[in-house]
Image: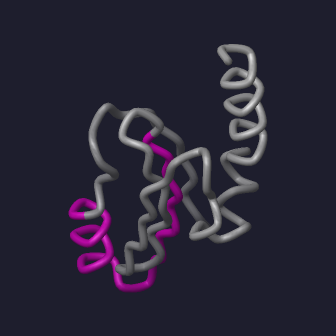
Amino acid sequence: SYITGSFMSAWSPPTAAYDTFLSENEDCTITSSYDEEGMSYVGIYDNGHDESYDYDLSDLSDIPDHIIEEFALDERREQWLEWNEEEE
């Protein structure tokens, strides 16, 4: 069995809550990905390991492909480039 969920937050991902849950439920796992557009960072939490990436839409080269795909960052980048071309 498993639990799945989704939420939106104006704050960072609840990694401390994940850690607490995992410490009390050793037979469970948690994988959670997140995108904080306002602060330009994305990441993934996987069973106690949190890996986040700051980004600028002009350069996504440091972000793993699976995260780019999950949050459609490449599409956002294209829209951003088009918007910047229109302003010039």
Nearer to me, 43 or 83: 83
Which residue appears at 64% of the width and 67% of the height? 61
Residue 52 drawn above or below residue 34: below
Which residue appears at 38% of the width and 73% of the height? 50
Residue at the limit of the structure toward the top, as seen here: 87
Residue at the limit of the structure toward the front, as seen here: 88
Compared across the picture, whether 44 is left or right of 73 comes to: left
Nearer to me, 34 or 24: 34
List x then y, in percent, for residue 29.
Answer: 48, 76
Nearer to me, 45 or 69: 69
Compared across the picture, whether 33 is left or right of 78 comes to: left
List x then y, in percent, for residue 42.
Answer: 49, 55
List x then y, in percent, for residue 24.
Answer: 25, 76
Compared across the picture, whether 11 is left or right of 9 comes to: left
Nearer to me, 57 or 6: 57
List x then y, in percent, for residue 9.
Answer: 36, 34
> What is the image's colouring?
one colour
Q: Tell me the quarter of the image containing the N terminus.
A: bottom right
Q: Tell me the quarter of the image containing the C terminus.
A: top right
Residue 20 is one of the magenta-drawn residues? yes
Residue 29 is one of the magenta-drawn residues? yes
Q: Quadrant of residue 45?
A: bottom left
Residue 82 drawn above or below residue 53: above
Compared across the picture, whether 23 is left or right of 61 comes to: left
Which residue appears at 64% of the width and 71% of the height? 64
Which residue appears at 73% of the width and 44% of the height? 72
Range drawn in magenta = 16-36
